[in-house]
Image (spheres, rainbow, N blue to C red):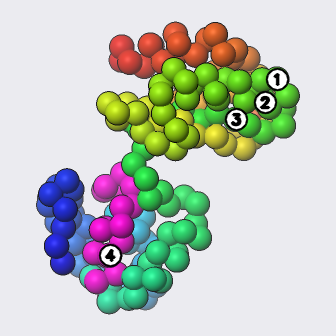
C-alpha cells in the first residue's frame, strides 16, 4: 500500500506494531482505529485504507465504522481544540456570538485547524457547567465561563504566547 509523504512512515510502523500485537484477537477493528487516531491525531482516508488492507476487511466497512462513532475524526484538529458550548443555557447567554467571534478572529471554518495548526474551533453540546454560561473549554481541562465576544482575542493571545 502506498502511503503519503505527508504522514511519517514511523507512524505507520507504530500502527503495524500495534496490529501485530492484537491481530489474533476477534473484533479488533475499533481498537485498531482508536490506536491509529492516537498515533496520527486523526483518521485520514489513506490511513483507513491502510487499516482495511492490513486487517483484510472491506474499506467500506472501515469507513462505515468511523462515520458511525463520533469519537473518530477524519479531519486534523488544532493543537488547542476550542470547544464552544451551544447547549441551551449557553446559547441564550450568547454562546453563538462567542463561537462566531472565535471563527472570525482565527479565520477558520468550524472543525478546521488554523493555518499554523494551533487552533480548531468545535461547537459542542452542554459541557455540564451551565451556571457559568456561556462556557468554552480549551483542550481537556481549561474551562472559561461567562465569556463575551470581547474576551475572545485575549484568550487566543494567551494560548498563542504559550
Ligand atoms: S448548556 Fe453550556 S454548559 Fe450546559
What distance separates the C-alpha of mark 4 from that of mark 3? 34 Å
Magenta-tinted stretch:
37-53
For marks 2 and 1, give the CA distance. 5 Å
Q: Nearer the viewer, mark 4 or mark 3?
A: 4
**Element under label 4?**
helix
Say which of 31 and 155 sits in front: 155
Query: Is 130 one of the magenta-colored residues?
Result: no
Ligand 1 neighbours mark 2 (CB distance < 8 Å) = yes
Q: CA distance from mark 4 to mark 2?
A: 39 Å
**Image quarter for residue 42?**
bottom left
- Whether pointer 4 and pointer 2 mark residues with C-beta atoms closer than 8 Å, the reply is no
For mark 3, give the secondary structure: strand
How would you rate the neighbour count of disc 4 (Cα within 10 Å): few for under 14, some for 14-19, many for 20 or more? Answer: some
Q: Earlier in the sequence, mark 2 or mark 3?
A: 3
Answer with mark 4 or mark 2, whichever residue precedes in sequence: 4
Q: Is residue 65 above or below residue 148?
A: below
Circles 3 and 1: CB distance less than 8 Å?
no
Residue at the image position 48 percent from the left and 18 percent from the top: 156
Q: Secondary structure at mark 1?
A: loop
Decide which of tag 4 and tag 3 comes sooner along the chain: 4
Q: Name the residue tied to disc 4.
A: 49
Secondary structure of the residue carrying tag 2 is: helix
**Callouts 2 and 3 close, C-beta under 8 Å:** yes
Amino acid at each position: 500500500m502506498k502511503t503519503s509523504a505527508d504522514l511519517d512512515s514511523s507512524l505507520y510502523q507504530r500502527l503495524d506494531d500495534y496490529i501485530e500485537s492484537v491481530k489474533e484477537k476477534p473484533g479488533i477493528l475499533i481498537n485498531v482505529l482508536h490506536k491509529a487516531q492516537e498515533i496520527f491525531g486523526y483518521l485520514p482516508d489513506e490511513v483507513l485504507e491502510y487499516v482495511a488492507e492490513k486487517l483484510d476487511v472491506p474499506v467500506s466497512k472501515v469507513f462505515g465504522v468511523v462515520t458511525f462513532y463520533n469519537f473518530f475524526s477524519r479531519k486534523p484538529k488544532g493543537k488547542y481544540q476550542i470547544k464552544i458550548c451551544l447547549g441551551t443555557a449557553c446559547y441564550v447567554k450568547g454562546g453563538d456570538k462567542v463561537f462566531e467571534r472565535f471563527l472570525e478572529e482565527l479565520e477558520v471554518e468550524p472543525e478546521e485547524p488554523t493555518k499554523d495548526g494551533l487552533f480548531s474551533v468545535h461547537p459542542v453540546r452542554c459541557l455540564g457547567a451551565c451556571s457559568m454560561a456561556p462556557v468554552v473549554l480549551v483542550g481537556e481541562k481549561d474551562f472559561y465561563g461567562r465569556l463575551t465576544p470581547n474576551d475572545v482575542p485575549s484568550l487566543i493571545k494567551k494560548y498563542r504566547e504559550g
